[in-house]
Amino acid sequence: MENRWTRRDFKIALTGGILLFIVYMIGAFWELLVTRDMCMFFMIGYLMATVVITPMMMTGKFGMGTLVFIPYALIGLPLEYYMEWILDPVLISPFAAVIWSAIGPIVGFSADLAYRFIPKSANDRTRGVATGLVLVTMHFLIMLSALTFLYTDPLLGLEHYLNALGFTLPWLLMNGAFGGYTAYALSQDLSAPR
């Protein structure tokens, strides 16, 4: 793949970013209306991995995983600040809202690093699956850190996040791997000459 970013690459990133935002919204509504006791982030691993890794595999551009998370971060920052600092002040400082918004791009960057440093001898299917596993694992760990350190009383958020961990963590990892495989399959189809 060529190193120069094209307009097509940015369109792919923006499309992925919009789809990722929709995935997060579906997850939020699912948590509020259906699961209630289970954190949404465990339920969206498949879709998140598929939406983030497909553009990475389609373009081969380093930084694509990070860029796909930018709409999430830009839209999320004012919402996080308003909801958890102004409306219900539970964050340790207003800067915590900035950190929350940076979580997505950091997770995307971890996927970029994984995709880049998985040995070139691995086939694309393996690269997709491994990148999916790294993506959801880093998402889990970074979210856990944020819930632990960014709140004045982290216990409630941690209790909700870690509820049924014996089921939800394997579920998340399995779905991240399947999402990476789906991204591989989609990228083969979407990148094929027409």
Image (cartoon, rainbow, N blue to C red):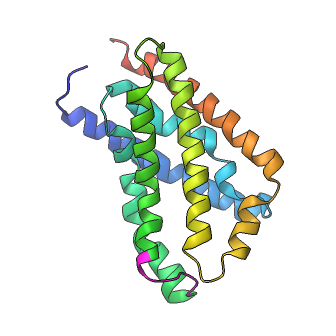
User: Which residue shows up at 58% across the image and 78% down it?
Assistant: 151
Left or right of 163, for residue 72: left
Q: Quadrant of the N terminus?
A: top left
| Residue 48 appears in view | no
Residue 54 belongs to magenta span: no
Residue 93 belongs to magenta span: yes
Residue 129, how many percent across, how many down?
Answer: 57, 26
Left or right of 192, for residue 185: right
User: Which residue shows up at 48% across the image and 48% down it?
Assistant: 20
Q: Is residue 45 above or below residue 25?
A: above
Q: Quadrant of the C terminus?
A: top left
Q: Is residue 87 above or below residue 2?
A: below
Q: Is residue 93 above or below residue 168?
A: below
Closest to the observer: 158 or 19? 158
Left or right of 66, for residue 168: right
Residue 38, how many percent across, how many down?
Answer: 77, 58
| Residue 160 appears in view | yes
User: Which residue shows up at 56% across the image and 50% down it?
Assistant: 139
In the image, the segment drawn in magenta is 89-95
Main SS of the magenta part reads loop
Q: Quadrant of residue 37?
A: bottom right
Residue 166, how many percent across, how many down?
Answer: 82, 47
Left or right of 23, for residue 163: right
Q: Is residue 22 above or below residue 170?
A: below
Q: How many marks?
A: 0
Q: Quadrant of residue 187?
A: top left
Residue 158, how many percent across, how many down?
Answer: 70, 67
User: Which residue shows up at 76% across the image and 47% down it?
Assistant: 168
